[in-house]
Image: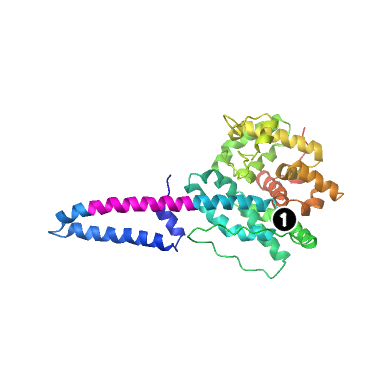
Amino acid sequence: MSVNVPRLLRHFPALSRRHFLAATAATGWATLRAVALDWDGLAEDLADVADRLDAWMGSAMAEWTEQLAADLRQNALVLLRAADEALQGLSEEQLAELEPWLRLAADHAAEIRELAPYAAWLRARLDYFAAAREAIAIAPLQPVRPRPPAPSPPWRRPPVRQPVPPPAPVRARRARAESAPALWRKRTAASPPPPPEAQTLLPLLKGAFRAERVPVELVWIAQVESSFDPRARSPRGAAGLFQLMPATARSLGLQTEPEDERENPARSAGAAARYLRQLHARFGSWPLALAAYNAGERRVRTALQENNARTFEEIAPALPIETRMYVPRVLETIRAREGLDPARLPPPG
């Protein structure tokens, strides 16, 4: 395991007592050793002691680093699972409470081997948590509390409380705010440009979508799903540029073992395009097809039936928070990157 301790400590000003003593002892001993080795007459006698203490402190610091990394790893995985469950729920308060923890986890996910596969998944979803806080301000259940500060060590388990969905009128107001194209147009304009890898991948991905007779502009789903990282994984087991679940991938002709073809850009793009073509055939519009891609066909079909509805806008309050933000986010990403009004996306060829 490779952990950059100085970099971690810059983000963690408050240490537990044990960690503080270990760090202080290490720093103090380094100073003492430097003075002792330069002190005429004592250098030879102290050199052996210095080497022994160096070995002891090196061992102690290695143990401390491993323990810190283990704490981060254990509790951050709990946090990622809580984040994924919150995105599938209906309580914005839960997302807002988790946001500072997730931003801290995103800062360090790439530094810890076990968390690195989730880094792209997490970065691609941080906007949802910020947008949830904005929706709470628009339709609050109670006076809006200030954003809590980012947590500091010792790295405790994140706050994971039983979510309470807001009343239907509040949920409807929040859903309108979260799914508003103007919100995601603004957020997309302020977001960082696509990573350099995107320019290499786009021709390949568009070729796969074109072969399946699906509008090539929809390849920008890969930015929303994985930030164009073919190795991205979610806590629920989705993987690849287009975050396909294992069962869905297999039904579309991909193998998930011994080699996981979801991490193959061309193969995963072809499977995602086939899936989108099937979803459009079942639901008749790209917003509903995208909603089903994110939340699942059954959930979208049930929402349409229970609300006697025909459009995404009509069922948005009944869909998971992530889904009602995912659909306009994909469409506005297409507008920003391709200069195309998403309402003019043609049906599959």
Q: Residue furthest bottom?
A: 143
Q: Is residue 23 above or below residue 237?
A: below
- Residue 212 located left or right of residue 97: right
Residue depicted at x 59% and y 50%: 80
Residue depicted at x 18% and y 58%: 38
Residues in magenta, as a range: 50-71
Q: Position of residue 11 (x, y in %)?
A: 46, 59
Closer to us: 35 or 55 = 55
- Residue 337 located left or right of residue 9: right
Is residue 51 within the magenta segment? yes
The answer to whether one can see residue 310 in this image is no
Q: Position of residue 319 (x, y in %)?
A: 75, 51
Q: How is the image coloured?
A: rainbow
Q: Is residue 243 above or below residue 62?
A: above
Q: Residue furthest left?
A: 41
The answer to whether one can see residue 322 in this image is yes
**SS class, disc 1:** loop
| Amino acid type for the residue under numbered disc 1 | Leu
For the N terminus, which image quadrant?
Answer: top left
Tell me the residue that label 1 is attached to: 90
Q: Position of residue 189 (x, y in %)?
A: 64, 53
- Residue 159 located left or right of residue 325: left
Q: Residue furthest right?
A: 308
Q: Is residue 242 above or below residue 318?
A: above
Q: Position of residue 187 (x, y in %)?
A: 65, 55
